[in-house]
Image (cartoon, rainbow, N blue to C red):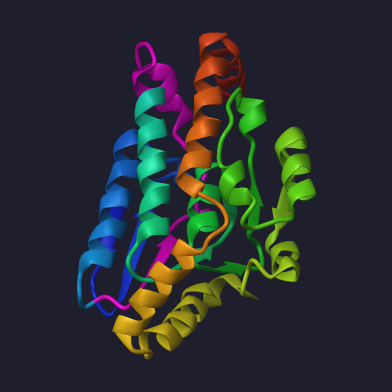
């Protein structure tokens, strides 16, 4: 359990943190290291990022945050999320995110920064941050849905389905849950069959022309999360969630 890297031409980074893949501070850093290591391996042609268990990702471990003294876990989670999201975006090869079940909070950060998203037909995506007294990952949500829907999702904490994202073109394929890994591997196989030098330059090129600086904008969001905590809103909403 934890974060596992399975090396190969199609490298797999697998998240398995029961019960719901809500990641602790160390898990976010482990995930960042695994994705970075996969991209740095000259034998890797593409990375598949997926999860075991009930859902793809439930964001940060709020219980860890509330157990920790002061703001140490908050700072750690923010730094860990920043590193993990950046590792996916900056990975030297394309990253295919295979999403099943829930993809919430930090999960949207991972999927939104992936190059390609495939999803099971039970997958849904959302940012419950406002209900948790926090902000963040709207940067990455904006890579998945249109701007006005971003705002509606942030303000209301509503979710969207994989089918809705497929209609927007941000989810490449929707499939049955038991076929998700197979479909992700099919997509990865097409990429892995290309010239690896050209694919790496293609990834570099696409990042270079990206109209959104995902790292700067996400850091701005995180700064406002710190304000919410200083004003007491963060603790109040997290405690309410854990009751």
Q: Nearer the viewer, residue 7 or 100?
A: 7
The answer to which image quadrant residue 29 occupies is top left
Could you tell me which residue is drawn at 31 percent across and 59 percent down?
Answer: 35
Magenta segment, which residues? 44-73
Above or below for 207 versus 179: above
Whether residue 179 sits left or right of residue 44 in the image: it is right
The answer to which image quadrant residue 10 occupies is bottom left
Is residue 122 part of the magenta span, yes or no? no
Could you tell me which residue is drawn at 61 percent across and 19 percent down?
Answer: 237
Above or below for 67 versus 44: above
Residue with the most extreme left position: 42
Is residue 64 part of the magenta span, yes or no? yes
**x, y (%) of residue 145?**
70, 56
**x, y (%) of residue 188?**
43, 80
Residue with the most extreme top position: 231
Could you tell me which residue is drawn at 74 percent across and 49 percent down?
Answer: 147
Whether residue 229 sits left or right of residue 191 in the image: it is right
Q: Is residue 59 visible?
A: no
Above or below for 143 versus 80: below
Could you tell me which residue is drawn at 63 percent across and 68 percent down?
Answer: 171
Q: Is residue 51 visible?
A: yes
**x, y (%) of residue 182?**
47, 80
The answer to which image quadrant residue 46 occupies is bottom left
Question: Which of the image's four quarters has the C terminus?
Answer: top right
Whether residue 156 sits left or right of residue 130 in the image: it is right
**x, y (%) of residue 193?**
37, 91
Circle count: 0
Q: Nearer the viewer, residue 204 or 89?
A: 204
């Amino acid at each position: 359990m934890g974060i596992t890297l399975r090396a190969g031409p199609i490298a797999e980074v697998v998240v398995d943190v029961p019960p719901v893949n809500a990641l602790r501070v160390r898990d976010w850093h482990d995930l960042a290291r695994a994705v970075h290591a996969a991209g740095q391996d000259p034998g890797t042609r593409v990375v598949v990022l997926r999860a075991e268990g009930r859902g793809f990702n439930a964001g940060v471990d709020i219980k860890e945050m509330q157990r920790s003294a002061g703001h140490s876990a908050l700072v750690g989670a923010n730094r860990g999320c920043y590193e993990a999201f950046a590792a996916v975006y900056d990975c030297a090869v394309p990253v295919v995110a295979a999403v099943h079940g829930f993809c919430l909070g930090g999960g949207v950060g991972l999927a939104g920064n992936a190059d390609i998203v495939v999803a099971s037909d039970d997958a849904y995506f959302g940012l419950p941050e406002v209900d948790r007294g926090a902000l963040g990952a709207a940067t990455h949500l904006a890579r998945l849905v249109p701007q006005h829907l971003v705002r509606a999702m942030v303000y209301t904490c509503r979710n969207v389905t994989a089918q809705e994202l497929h209609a927007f073109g941000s989810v490449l394929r929707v499939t049955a849950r038991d076929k998700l890994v197979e479909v992700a591997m099919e997509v990865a196989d097409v990429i892995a069959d290309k010239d690896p030098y050209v694919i790496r330059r293609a990834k570099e090129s696409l990042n270079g022309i990206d109209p959104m600086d995902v790292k700067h904008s996400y850091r701005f969001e995180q700064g406002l999360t710190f304000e919410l905590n200083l004003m007491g809103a963060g603790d109040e909403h997290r405690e309410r969630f854990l009751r």
